[in-house]
Amino acid sequence: MTTDAILLNDWHAVAKVEDLKSTSLLPARLLGENIVLWRYENQIMAWQDKCPHRGARLSIGSISGDTLICPYHGFEYDTTGTCTHIPAYPNRQPPQRVRVKTYTVQECYGLIWVCLGTPDTPTPAPFAEWQDSSYRKFLCGPYNYQSSGFRAIENFLDVSHFPFVHDGLLGSRSYTAVEDYEVRKEETGFSLCNVPVWQPDPDGTGKGGKVIYNYRVWRPLTTSFVKETNGNCLAIYFTVAPINEEECLGWMWIAMNYGFEIPEIDLKTFQDKVVNQDIPIVESQQPKCLPLDLQAEFHLPCDKSSIFYRKWLREMGVSFGVI
Ligand code: FES
Ligand code: FE
């Protein structure tokens, strides 16, 4: 397992709550570890996907009520990960030390979040619009990137690629100049304030114009922005789970206080299109891990979001998925 305490002690979204059925075992991968998720009534378990007996994958075993049964020799484990029954010795109490490694897990924003270490915070990063009923919300993804999660987040914070990667959707080749914006250090993380972007159709009227984005980076792999046009607010909460150093899973909640008449499928299709324009570019970036040495790549003034992000990650001592 990685020794990166920042990522080990953070929350990562590994699955949708609705995908975890009460009778099924759901495998996931986080920070290079194989995990198995399962549920008994209202309790969710996130365990190392490895039987302590001979290392078989528990996710290909079975569930019987509050018991998970290993597929290999049938060891039974209760919801705390303690072995309660060894079929080869049906009349003996299993030794106390036969236990599956368990992780901290919680449900939040319709997602299952796992922490492999000791959580730094009781809950995942805030999502202000979650409780606000004037916003409609829908979840997009998960999007798989064959790249470091930090490359995916940095791409999300970068507006100068809009005219090229998202020409006609989020930007236009006729408006490539980037105006200045402010980067502000926050108690946790940082903000990008008043980032102006020219968009071909910012409010759905078909007329191009300038919009203002305000970003907040909450955690190394969780960020959000709000963009406002004439009282219409669109917020995106983006969290990325690091599968390995060079692979990640991105979850995107979209919240809008307008456009209630637009079918959700149309909005999701639009978002999928945008992200699927980003993914091949991000995956093409070499190296796949994010370079924290600022001399390793060339920077422009408009890259100050990336510069700040990289410095911040380096200050914290992040080591997984970066070089
Ligand atoms: Fe799981 Fe033997 S490997 S019971
Ligand atoms: Fe993009």
Image: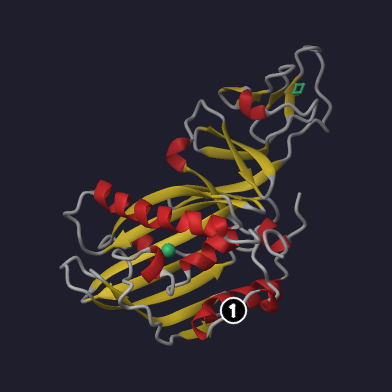
**In the drawing, does residue 147 fall left or right of residue 162?**
right
Residue under the image location 69 percent in, 56 percent down: 8
Residue under the image location 73 percent in, 61 percent down: 5
Q: Position of residue 218 (x, y in %)?
A: 53, 69
Vertical placement of residue 78 versus 141, above or below: above
Residue under the image location 51 percent in, 71 percent down: 217
Amino acid type shown at disc 1: Ile
Say how many tags the image has: 1
Q: Position of residue 216 (x, y in %)?
A: 47, 73
State the SS at label 1: helix
Q: Residue furthest front?
A: 174
Determine crowd level at label 1: few under 14, some 14-19, many 20+ residues with C-alpha closer than 10 A: some
Q: Position of residue 233 (x, y in %)?
A: 28, 70
Task: Describe the colour scheme in one phrase.
Answer: secondary structure
The residue beneath circle 1 is 307
Q: Is residue 122 visible?
A: no
Q: Quadrant of residue 65?
A: top right
Q: Quadrant of the C terminus?
A: bottom right
Q: Is residue 303 visible?
A: yes
Q: Position of residue 294 (x, y in %)?
A: 67, 78
Q: Quadrant of residue 78?
A: top right
| Ligand 1 sits in quadrant | top right
Vertical placement of residue 58 versus 294, above or below: above
155 or 29, nearer to the observer: 155
Q: Quadrant of residue 308?
A: bottom right
CB of mark 1 near ligand 2 (< 8 Å):
no
